[in-house]
Amino acid sequence: MLKFFGLLTVIASVFGGFLLAKGQLAALWQPAEVVIVMGAAIGSYIISNPMPVLRDTLAQLRGIVTSEKEDPELYPQLFGLMNTLMNQIRMNGLKVLDEHIEKPFESSIFLTYPAVLRQPMLLSFLVDNLRLQSMGKLTAHEFQHLMEEEIHRLQEDRMRPSHAMHRTGEALPGFGILAAVMGIIITMGAIDGPLTMIGVHVAAALVGTFMGVFACYCLFEPAASAMAHLIDRRIAQLHCVKAILVAQQAGKQPLLALDAGRRLIQEENRPSFLQLERYLVEEQR
């Protein structure tokens, strides 16, 4: 909802200001310029990016509209899940988790925490590293290094759509100039016509420049920034799990391990230590 409000604010400010200056909105309606600028931008985006990036772009654009805030149940359920898993490991050893991490969607433990199951990247990271933990003897430092490398790789992959959107946004003023130059070519072909028609052609050409700048700074660049914030939020989930698993591998008590993960959550989503304790108390009821 907030994103739609921001978009409406941009549109109202730009076009409302144009109207206040006695401009005619009809003069900005130049379908040919829109086709040239937006068509070139979309086409270049498709040419310059592989199919996985295109799919992720659509998914992330959907995400910035539908998932503006973190699921309020995610971190309470994540802490509850990690606490349950660590207690199982302490009582029965790592091997007891094999049946749960192989098929988390059929696991009696994981099914208790649906908010975690709705986060595919988080779930995959968690079960893969629990599997790694159970396969061999890794020191806490080695385990931490492996997870940090994986998070770095995941972050680079997930940020590709944002970077691609940013590059396309930077190119949009150039596409606007392209449309303007083509409009001037048309104007020069009608140079012997009435002055009013020449003015109409020049105005249409300038709309191309306007479209390029507007799409860059009011659409593509804000979308790229919002996509980056979405990924930062999801990567913070992985850092939280990493800190918990490293502390658990180092032999820390479950509450201390959970607090280590809590400290790496983004500030707007981070519960206090007392809230963390309350989550665990409610979990045990």
Image (cartoon, helix red, strand yellow):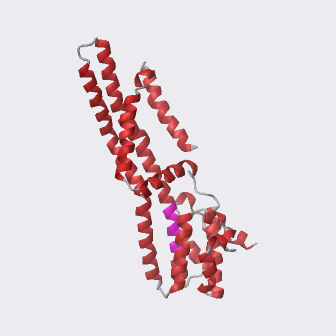
Q: In this view, does 47 lie above or below 279?
A: above
Q: Which of 72 and 103 is in front in this view?
A: 103
Q: Main secondary structure of the magenta part?
A: helix
Q: Is residue 27 above or below residue 260?
A: above
Q: What stretch is highlighted in magenta?
A: 234-244
Residue 257 counted in the magenta span: no
Screen quadrant of the N terminus? top right
The residue most toward the right is: 285
Residue visible at 33% across and 32% down? Answer: 209
Residue visible at 43% across and 41% down? Answer: 219
Residue visible at 44% across and 60% down? Answer: 158
Q: In which quarter of the image is residue 270?
A: bottom right
Residue visible at 65% across and 87% down? Answer: 92
Screen quadrant of the C terminus? bottom right
Residue 121 shows up from this direction: yes
Q: Which of 252 and 136 is in front in this view?
A: 136
Indicate left or right for 186 with 6 as reference: left
Q: Nearer the viewer, residue 45 or 234?
A: 45
Q: Which of 185 and 60 is in front in this view?
A: 185
Indicate left or right for 172 with 127 as reference: left
Residue 166 shows up from this direction: no
Q: In this view, does 45 lie above or below 137?
A: above
- x%, y% of residue 186? 28, 24
- x%, y% of residue 52? 44, 58
- x%, y% of residue 237? 53, 65
How many labels were placed on the picture? 0
- x%, y% of residue 85? 63, 78
